[in-house]
Image (spheres, helix red, strand yellow):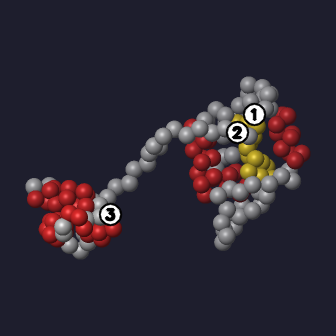
């Protein structure tokens, strides 16, 4: 792996007309970075005796608030979401919705809740969501689903 200053010397030997994104990626990869701007910054830090780590930390963030619209909102403030598949993206989204709306009663109804969350997994959609504190029903559990919806009085929220 080359040092950033070495990569910068090589980069500066290339005629400006020949510098493009493909060449930039190739050169920055010589020192394990993604862009020549990062390489140039690393070379500057090195030249000034500033110690650093490159991409040594990862932080959680929410770039932009997202909007969620449940499929059904009942009179007694139960929100029903009908799901066919529960992909990893769907599961993460529903966890984020749950965290952002702790006072809401969200009930999931799956077309096939017995489906596995992944090809080689033993965990079903129902098992995964229930472990995460969701109220959920398989399509075949129609009576249980309706009984739950009817049993909740308006204004009373369950604590998940």
User: Nearer the observer, disc 3 or disc 2?
Assistant: 3
At 23% across and 64% down in the image, what residue appears? 17
Q: What is the quadrant of the C terminus in the image?
A: top right
Residue 149, percent from left and from top: 82, 37
Q: In the figure, is residue 65 to the left or right of 122?
A: left
Image disc number at residue 70: 2
Considering depth in this image, is 148 or 47 the residue closer to the camera?
47
Residue designated by label 1: 73
Marks 2 and 1 close (CB-CB < 8 Å):
yes
Q: Could you tell me if residue 69 is visible in this image?
A: yes
Q: Is residue 44 above or below residue 118?
A: above
Question: Relative to the observer, which residue lies in front, 94 or 21?
Answer: 21
Q: How many marks?
A: 3
Pointer 2: residues within 10 angstroms few (<14), some, or many (20+)?
A: few
Relative side of 77 to 102, left or right: right
Res. 10 image quadrant: bottom left
Instruction: For marks 3 and 1, give the CA distance.
Output: 50 Å
**Farthest-out residue, right:** 143
Q: Would you call the spot at circle 3 few (<14 residues within 10 Å), some (14-19), or many (20 or more)? A: few
Alpha carbon separation for disc pair 2 and 1: 7 Å
């Amino acid at each position: 792996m080359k040092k950033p200053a070495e990569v910068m010397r090589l980069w500066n030997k290339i005629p400006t007309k020949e510098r493009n994104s493909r060449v930039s990626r190739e050169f920055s990869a010589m020192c394990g970075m993604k862009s020549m701007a990062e390489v140039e910054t690393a070379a500057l830090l090195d030249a000034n005796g500033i110690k650093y780590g490159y991409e040594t930390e990862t932080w959680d963030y929410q770039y932009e608030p997202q909007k969620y619209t449940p499929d059904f909102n009942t009179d007694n403030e139960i929100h029903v979401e009908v799901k066919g598949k529960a992909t990893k993206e769907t599961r993460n989204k529903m966890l984020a919705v749950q965290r952002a709306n702790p006072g809401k009663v969200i009930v999931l109804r799956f077309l096939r809740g017995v489906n596995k969350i992944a090809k080689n997994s033993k965990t079903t959609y129902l098992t995964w969501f229930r472990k995460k504190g969701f109220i959920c029903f398989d399509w075949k559990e129609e009576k249980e689903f309706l009984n739950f919806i009817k049993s909740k009085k308006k204004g009373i929220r369950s604590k998940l």
